[in-house]
Image (cartoon, rainbow, N blue to C red):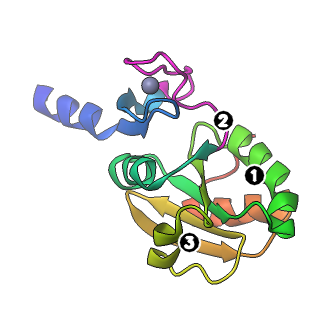
Amino acid sequence: MHAERTAADHAHKVLVACPQCHTLVRVAGERLADRPRCARCKAQVLSGQPIELDAAAFATHVERATLPVLVDFWAPWCGPCRMMAPVLDEAAHRWAERLQLGKVNTDVEQQLASRFNIRSIPTLILFDGGREIARQSGAVDLASLTRWLESSLGARAPR
Ligand SMILES: [Zn+2]
């Protein structure tokens, strides 16, 4: 009985990478809504804001953390990417307890872009447990993005 409860509690732990110092923070699943903070730098780990990811931060947030990460592969010169930015800001805010939003500048992080075979931007890739579970190329509005996230994550939008 006791062992079962321990196993269930363990299963509900979520590993989230801190947006500031990129330390991995263990959060109980039911506490994701309680604005958990990083033990090292005290930043809010679920800030609801996009996080710039270089290769090292990408490895921590996407491959080691267990919270899903939506990654926007973009570049500063790309008009559709700039149009998409406020939509992604809003999605990051709305889905703060369900995922992190990472941004990869494909001009700077060319190895990541080639590793994930990015042929056009913006391209959005949804990762869960380090694995790509969905991909979307081209700019979309918030309603389409929300539907895509809902069907990809098998969950309703939080708000
Ligand atoms: Zn931190």
Q: Which residue is mark 2?
A: 48
Q: Earlier in the sequence, mark 1 or mark 2?
A: 2
Question: Looking at the image, which is closer to me, 129 or 115?
Answer: 115
Looking at the image, which residue is at 38% across and 38% down? 14
Residue 76 visible in the picture? yes
Q: Quadrant for the C terminus, please.
A: top right
**Residue 134's disc number:** 3
Residue 12 position in % (x across, y down): 35, 37
* Contact flag, marks 1 and 3 (Cβ < 8 Å): no
Residue drawn 59% across the image and 46% down it: 52
Q: Nearer the viewer, residue 93 or 50?
A: 50
Which residue occupies 63% across, 84% down?
Answer: 119
Amino acid type at mark 1: Leu
* Position of residue 100 in the picture relative to residue 66 (left or right): right
CA gap between label 3 and label 2 equals 21 Å
Name the residue located 66 percent from the left edge and 60 percent from the top edge.
149
Which amino acid is tagged 2? Answer: Gly
Which residue does the numbered mark 1 point to in the structure image?
88
Whether residue 154 is visible, yes or no, is no
Could you tell me residue 133's position as x and y percent? 49, 70
* Residue 28 point in image, percent of width and height: 38, 28
Q: Which stretch did the figure color magenta?
A: 31-50
